[in-house]
Amino acid sequence: MSAIPSIPTSMSRAGAVAALAAATMTASLLVPGAAAEAEAATPAAKALKVAAAKKGSPYRYGAAGPNRFDCSGLTLYAYKKAGKSLPRTAAAQYNRTRHVSAKSRKPGDLVFFHSGGQVYHVGIYAGKNQVWHSPKPGKSVRKEKIWTGKVRYGRVK
């Protein structure tokens, strides 16, 4: 006895293919975690995962990985691994992104810290008001709560 269901003779070959494709798509939507895996495939989600994997890497001014980072070096490295290119500095990265509101921010967006209109620091939004970043000399890549309201958000195009 065959495990493959028989196709009624009244159904055309094209109709059978369409029915099989529809059944396959429906089944894939019912698989737990399938939506999360599809979301993880976005460049933003990949960059976020890369940044998180660099937890504990030491800060070094001007470094862009793979073992040491400054703030914009971490975002540049993470997005490069996700298949996107960014300029080198935090200010230039801000100018290259599509600016989004705090209400519209999503994990993987860039968080730009500013003072007097000048961007001085960047990290990757991790969700729940937290950011992955490489803070300053003597510190290492970490996830922490966003500590100021003086931030802007940018989505990598």
Image: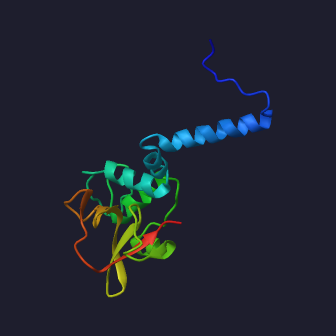
Most foreground residue, 122 or 31: 31
Q: How is the image coloured?
A: rainbow
Look at 36% across and 78% down and name the residue there: 119
Position of residue 92 measured from the top left corner of the image (x, y, whole percent): 46, 73
Most foreground residue, 114 or 155: 155
Most foreground residue, 123 or 42: 42
Is residue 113 visible from the viewing direction of this image? yes
Look at 46% across and 40% down and name the residue there: 31
Relative to 76, is 99 above or below? below
Question: For residue 3, what is the image quadrant?
Answer: top right
Look at 51% across and 72% down and name the residue there: 96
Q: Residue furthest left?
A: 138
- Answer with left or right where residue 129 lies relative to residue 17: left
Is residue 65 visible from the viewing direction of this image? no
Look at 40% across and 73% down and name the residue there: 153
Q: Quadrant of the N terminus?
A: top right
Position of residue 12 measured from the top left corner of the image (x, y, whole percent): 80, 34
Relative to 42, is 7 above or below? above
In this rendering, the count of numbered labels is 0
Q: Residue furthest top?
A: 1
Q: Residue furthest bottom?
A: 116
Question: For residue 63, what is the image quadrant?
Answer: bottom left
